[in-house]
Image (tube, rainbow, N blue to C red):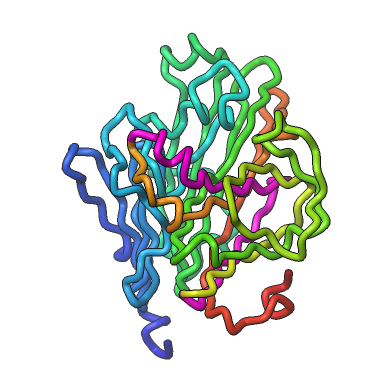
Amino acid sequence: MGHSAAVWDSRTAMETIEDWNGIKQVVLRNPQGASARVSLHGGQVTSWRNDHGEELLFTSSKAIFKPPKAIWGGIPICFPQFGNAGSLEQHGFARNKLWTIDEDPPPLHPNESRGKSFVDLLLKPSEEDLKGWPHSFEFRLRVSLATDGDLTMISRVRNVNGKPLSFSFAYHTYFSVSDISEVRIEGLETLDYLDNLCQRERFTEQGDAVTFESEIDRVYLNAPGAVAVLDHEKKRTYVIRKEGLPEYVVWNPWEKKSKAMADFGDEEYKQMVCVDGAAIAKPITLKPGEEWTGKVQLKVVPSSFCSEHLGL
């Protein structure tokens, strides 16, 4: 990148626009032309493009971009509940709320800012939220785009309540793929998982990779820091790295469930796979005043990279 790196000003690489519903979106760019788009509706990343302008995240063509409807695609934030395992709406309320831009967040490590374009968002519970879930919290989210095109999300949840706070969490990441039947996920072999299609029964992964021939809905337990999603047809690999999150969720709805979802195309399951850094089987518990941090870093590389090179 040469001299341009020295004059690159990350502050000029963030632009705030409005979508057709008047909801603010933050667009992040890097010098090579990669970009990410974050909606204040849900604090949700709705687009991540490489330096060739190719979209790396899947969003359903039938997705409804209008609160209070959740957006099918991108990276919804599932908090304080994942799925329907609790008294709240599916995947909790964070993905359906309007977040604010945090102009003066508590500092992160300098490496989380250096050479990156980023935005800091903030969510606090409304009076209505506290009626349904009586816990006061501050949820800070940083979304950053690095000069190499990596997308990083850092969540910080602080308990500002006088009593302990427990929650589940996931970065529900919809990756765009060419054909789900040609996709394999490496890094989860030999792990135990909870199968949501079998009443959360516990099994052990037997294959040398996770492949797709039917619906999959699993929570892989005590998972390693990094996994890779290999897209054979596009000859590219997504590498997901996580910190502070013990599990990975793997999901594809397949044909029957896709047809049953109103805002999801009947055949769109072929073009997506969800792989989420998560804390579900082991929820996070915070004492009063305590803060939790959970991070994912998403990278895309040519599939000619071998697993050893990726540190899997």
Give residue 258's quadrant in the image.
top left
Instruction: From the viewer's perspective, tell me whether residue 158 is left or right of residue 202.
Output: left
Above or below, 41 against 34 in this view is: above
Out of 251 and 141, give the one closest to the viewer.
251
Out of 253 and 169, give the one closest to the viewer.
253
Above or below, 197 against 109 in this view is: above
Q: Residue at x 53, y 19 (%)?
A: 88
Quarter occupied by the N terminus: bottom left
Above or below, 289 against 171 in this view is: above
Out of 20 and 69, give the one closest to the viewer.
69
Q: Residue at x 60, y 32 (%)?
A: 158
Q: Is residue 266 visible?
A: yes
Give the magenta part as a residue range: 234-262
Q: For residue 251: magenta?
A: yes
Residue 76, percent from left and from top: 46, 42
Give residue 287's quadrant in the image.
top right
